[in-house]
Image: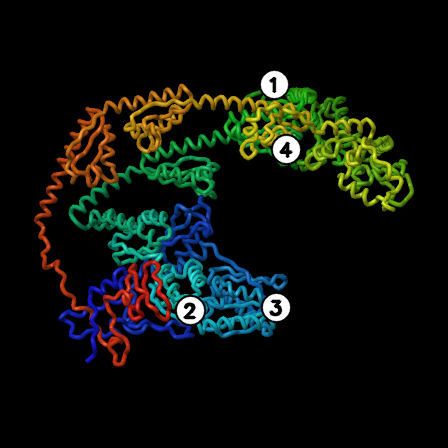
Amino acid sequence: MSSVAVLTQESFDEHRSGLAQPAVRVAAIGSEEESDPPTYKDAFPPLPEKAVGSETPSEPVGAWSKIRPIKSSVITQVFHVPLEERRYKDMAQFGEGEQAKICLDIMQKTGAQLELSLAKDQGLSIMVSGKLDSVMKARKEIVTRLQTQASASIAIPKEHHRFVIGKSGDKLQDLELKTATKIQVPRPDDASNQIKITGTKEGIEKARHEILLISAEQDKRAVERLEVEKAFHPFIAGPYNKTVNDIMHETGTRINIPPPSVNKTEIVCMGEKDQLAQAVVRIRQIYEEKKKKTTSIAVEVRKSQHKYVIGPKGNSLQEILERTGVSVEIPPSDSSSETVILRGEPEKLGQALTEVYAKANSFTVATVSAPSWLHRFIIGKKGQNLAKITQQIPKVHIEFTEGEDKISLEGPTEDVTVAQQQMEALVSDLEQYKVSVRIPQDSEKSSQIRIEGDPQGVQQAKKELLELAQRMENERTKDLIIEQRFHRTIIGQKGERIREIREKFPDVIINFPDPTTKSDIVQLRGPKNEVEKCTKYLQKMVSEMVENSYSISVPIFKQFHKNIIGKGGANIKKIREECNTKIDLPAENSNSEMIVITGKKSNCEAARDRILAIQKELANITEMEVSIPSKLHNSLIGAKGRFIRSIMEECGGVHIHFPSEGSGSDTVTIRGPAQDVERAKKQLLQLAEEKQTKSFTAELQAKPEYHKFLIGKGGGNIRKVRDQTGARIIFPTAEDKDQQLITIVGTEEAVKDAQKELESLIKSLDNIVEDTMSVDPKHHRHFVIRRGQVLRDIAEEYGGVTVSFPRSGVQSDRVTLKGAKECVEAAKKRIQDIIEDLEAQITMECMIPQRFHRSIMGPKGSRIQQITREHGVQIKFPDREENLQAATNAESPAQENGEEGAENKIAADPGSPKKCDIIVISGRKERCEAACEALKALVPVSIEVDVPYDLHRYIIGQKGAGIRKMMDEFEVNIQVPAPELQCDIITITGLSSNLDRAKGGLLERVKELQAEQEDRALRSFKLVISVDPKYHPKIIGRKGAVISQIRTEHDVNIQFPDKNDENQDQITITGYERNTEAAKEAIMQIVGDLEQMVSEDITLDHRVHARIIGGRGKAIRKIMDEFKVDIRFPQSGAPDPNLVTVMGKPEDVDEAIDHLLNLEEEYMSDVVENEVMQSYMKPPSQDENKPQPSKGFVVRDAPWAAGGSNEKAPDMTSSEDFPSFGAPVAHKTSPWGPKRHGGGKGLMPADMSASC
């Protein structure tokens, strides 16, 4: 007869408390129906063992093989894609565009249902429903197509690439299919040896491993394959691959360890033979050492918790390996095994096991009971109800299984608890009627809704459904016309503005048209009143946008654009900020002079006036208005503005502004230098008179190179023709297609005369002649330098005449000119003028200290370039002083006998100018003198301004912002003395023209600061009042509402005494004197009202207190607000739990007490009724509550009952043999070393692992 081990039920239950429900239930022995107790193996079946080296997991054996998971055919899964991993992030097209097309394609391919929603963190919540296989396929497709893919590059020798591709690309296709990655191999003509792999991290690792194996196969001379048991690979790789990287770095080899997902034992090493041998020795040493010293244990961890032990990207496993030196082996995800193997040194296994359990239990799984028919209502329309939970707690995974009355939640313990509470609340809300509602599908075309359940619940559900239907009947749809250009602004850059509008009107659905349709219709749908409110809100928003989109163009001469921008953009930034407008200037390389201002009309006009004022200040600009009938405006402007543009160019670039079409105004504005404005006015009126009488137009053709010669220098030739004939001659601009067309406008007689004159000029230009002239060879270089720029200018100005100088090395002074006769003569005269200038050239020295040279040059030499253009001179700056000194030292003679040459013995004249200070100017004498004066005018000068020392820090501003702003605005340098000097003098350095403005600006700032100081003194007036401390809380108000209102209304600061202050009745008010007095009156009025209040105690049965107070105190707050009283309930443990205090004005207190007594009477009837009902309920008998004696837990064939066994039966009362979570365990020596009890987890016997 076999021995029987008896375990008491109580100790067994104590051991099992806190653990997950066991996977196998074992019946307790002691029931009369059971004749024989179960065997030990039946009660505690052994764990399945995995065959070493087997690629497929072995099937479970024993009693475990009888258990098969039962899964529904249809499941629902929700998961989250973070914002940073989303492929499509355009919030304006959420639910549309490419993302929507991909989702439809996935649904068609897999047969699963997809629903997308946007979380608060802009992540994507995706709910997938369907059969398990379809859901898995859909999820894979979503990860591939909606989530960003990782990529990695691997370098292998170029000659190995063809082996990776294989014959006709078969090898590459098989590799991509096997690893689910995209592999890009560079083309044969590409020198790169990098192969790019795109896909999931696991797939990339597999593909990388396979490619390295292929490459290693082709490099036999430097490849070593080591057979190492898979279990020891983590020790060779080390935590975070540190060990293998160190080996590779030290030996210069390449080592490929198969990833955990690949069931291969071969480690491939590649490199130079000597270095490879070192690497192999190191790997074998690690392998042999770990094989001797390490041992392994197997523990059971629920399959659902494996991913938490692994951690993100396997970080948790690496963390355990780094801390403890123990490797943790997790079974593959497609295996049903729950056995986790820990391998390491015995003394470290306990610590590693504790960490494994800690990682596993950092996440938890919970279930919420809910009838399966209720699932779709919990999910809500398009997952709205569920999205409210998943958006707040994105880390929790919620799974619905069709046909089962439960919902599974998985995630971090705290988050799961919160989600569970919210789900239970949602279920209880939906279950309150205890009815089942069946709404027909759209395809049924039925108007009947079926409600089943409790009669009272059915009636209540029917009533609510009818009310809902009535509300839906009240819904309306409205089309709102909004210009499409405003749609994106209303939606916002990331959809933030439309979200605010939808939160403001939650019952209204707002639909914008697709941008590609170019529609202006925005559709609103919802309750009638809400739709109307939303319509008004959107119309107001659009009207503000229209008002802010007013735009005007201001013509400003190009040379003044830089002054309008200011140094570092200071001027334009100030105008933008103060006028609240957007100002766009044309690009530097653009010919446009228009500055565009956008914003509100009044703001745009203010900005325009400020910009025009800057131009007017900088130049002698006048503005004149001319009255011309509006019917003539279009004809005066001409096609594409040709006529008006010719007048503007001819009159020195004046600006002529016509009123907008349809305004009916006759006023034309001319702006520019006074003399040019008069000329433009005269020509404009003359052209208008011609248009009013009888205008005649003629056209001529002339080569573009003749145009400049026909116009003449400064327009002299064409002005002469116009003055003689009275006709207007218009030449083509660079934008015109026909560059040869010349248009003549005027009276018929004038046009014919001008046409005749021009035709004769063009004919003479067509008469090509060749002439020569003599030019001294010493001047030849001036004409041919800079790639013949001077000759090109002459050819452009004089009708394309060709000027040929003798070739370099030929001693000749003969220069040949070829072209039209008049052009050749004019070119000869121009060359002679240039020669005269060259012969009259002098060289002048301008003395300016070198420290000012950089300032004179200006940014990128702009100031010097301007002077050379204006005065027609050449300016050369000296080398820097250190360069000159180095050159002088190099040329000085060597010393002899400690003495220098005689010529060096004479000391230099201290008054003589330094070479580094001399600027050389070349050109005509009068021009050189003018240029020298212009240079000296650019030398910065300094002035001193007396500013009180205590204001210096305010002038400097926070981090120097104030003083930088002034320096940028006035284009000067402002130097403030160091604080330790305590000096009042501030130095301003800059151009003399800017100093006065800078000084004025600085003094103006000083006045502002002094005014602020005076204001601060006035604001610091203090008034102290005495108020009984018992009134302080009432003066402060709930959450400081009352005192905040007084502070805001009277612009004062009110300070109450601290707890430790002696004078607890003093309140200090700080601010303007008149404001403090007003605040004092407001406080004293509150005190007066409080002094009139009375306090009365009433007796209210404590059993009704909770109902009177209400949820979160809402009900009692409503009563206090309604009767304007304060009601205080007794605290727990008070002597009289029924005593309630009411405070307020006498009449208000009486009314509040009456109301409370009425409520007590009403609620007490319910309390008494409930107590009566309780008394009729059958009390539980003592026999039922008395615990029955347990007969214990009995098993047969236990290991300790076997003959000759040294084992003894476990003691169920022993915390050592059966530790519980959180209970301290006595230390006992074992081969594993001392046991750790971190986190309240104890080690369990191996025999009990199956039931855990």
Q: Residue 40 location, x and y as percent? A: 25, 74
Label 4 with label 2: CB-CB less than 8 Å: no
Q: Circle 3 sits on which residue? A: 159
**Most foreground residue, 463 or 1189:** 1189
Q: From the image, state whether disc 3 or disc 1 is nearer to you.
A: 3
Q: Tell me which residue sits at (18%, 70%) in the image.
A: 29
**Most foreground residue, 1181 or 1220:** 1220
Give whichever of discs 3 and 4 has the lower sequence position.
Answer: 3
Give whichever of discs 3 and 2 has the lower sequence position.
Answer: 3
Viewer can see residue 635: no
Q: Which mark is residue 345?
A: 2
Give whichever of discs 1 and 4 has the lower sequence position.
Answer: 4
Could you tell me how far apart the alpha carbons at marks 1 and 4 are, in whole angstroms?
26 Å
Q: Which mark is residue 627?
A: 1
Label 2 with label 1: CB-CB less than 8 Å: no
Give whichever of discs 2 and 1 has the lower sequence position.
Answer: 2
Is disc 1 surrounded by few (<14), some (14 to 19) or many (20+) residues within 10 Å? few
Secondary structure of residue under mark 4? loop
Amino acid type, callout 4: Ser
Could you tell me how far apart the alpha carbons at marks 3 and 2 are, in whole angstroms?
45 Å
Quadrant into which the C terminus falls = bottom left
Label 3 with label 4: CB-CB less than 8 Å: no
Figure quadrant of residue 1145: top left
Give whichever of discs 4 and 2 has the lower sequence position.
Answer: 2
Q: Circle 4 sits on which residue? A: 592
Is disc 2 surrounded by few (<14), some (14 to 19) or many (20+) residues within 10 Å? many
Label 1 with label 4: CB-CB less than 8 Å: no
